[in-house]
């Protein structure tokens, strides 16, 4: 899955907002569809962040891996959405929520 989000902030501000947002994900009690997030990890190498986190719904767990590449005016989010996660929530819904939340974050 891939999302591209355009923004008008300075690149460093965009990266800082993304970092704070991802850090806060584990603090949330739950997400739509009863999904919980834990064991997040992120590493910046230049303007690219590698990330991973576990998602849980009921007794099912899956790990999502991906990258965020921050350019001067856009962010490209690429993620491998495991089959088990796509059974909980359709991939197009995941993509729409990620795009919407990233747009809000960077506006």
Image (cartoon, rainbow, N blue to C red):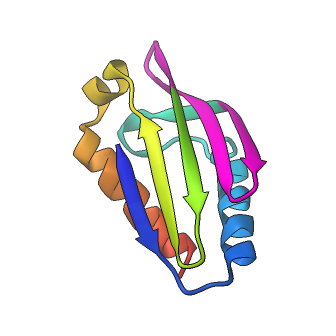
Along the viewing direction, whichever of 74 and 100 lies nearer the viewer: 74
Choose top left, top right, bottom left or bottom right for residue 98. Answer: bottom left
Residue 55 point in image, percent of width and height: 51, 28
Along the viewing direction, whichever of 100 and 10 lies nearer the viewer: 10
Residue 73 point in image, percent of width and height: 54, 79
Residue 24 point in image, percent of width and height: 69, 52
Residues rendered magenta in the picture: 39-63
- State left or right for residue 106 relative to residue 87: right
- State left or right for residue 66 relative to residue 51: left
Along the viewing direction, whichever of 98 and 31 lies nearer the viewer: 98
Quarter of the picture containing the N terminus is: top left
Q: Which residue is drawn at 72% across and 35% down?
A: 41
Choose top left, top right, bottom left or bottom right for residue 50. Answer: top right
Along the viewing direction, whichever of 64 and 68 lies nearer the viewer: 68
Let me know if residue 45 is in the magenta part: yes
Q: Give the overall secondary structure of the magenta segment.
A: strand
Q: Which residue, as the protein is rendered here, is positioned at the far bottom? A: 8
Let me know if residue 80 is in the magenta part: no
6 in relation to 4, above or below: below
Q: Which residue is drawn at 43% across and 69% down?
A: 5
């Amino acid at each position: 899955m891939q999302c591209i989000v355009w923004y008008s902030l300075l690149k460093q501000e965009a990266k800082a907002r993304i970092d704070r947002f991802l850090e806060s994900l584990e603090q949330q009690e739950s997400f739509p569809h009863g999904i919980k997030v834990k064991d997040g990890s992120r590493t910046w190498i230049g303007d690219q962040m590698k990330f991973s986190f576990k998602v849980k719904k009921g007794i099912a767990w899956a790990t999502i891996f991906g990258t965020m590449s921050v350019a001067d005016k856009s962010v490209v989010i690429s993620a491998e959405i495991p089959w088990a996660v796509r059974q909980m929530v359709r991939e197009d819904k995941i993509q729409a929520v990620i795009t919407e939340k990233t747009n809000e974050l960077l506006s």
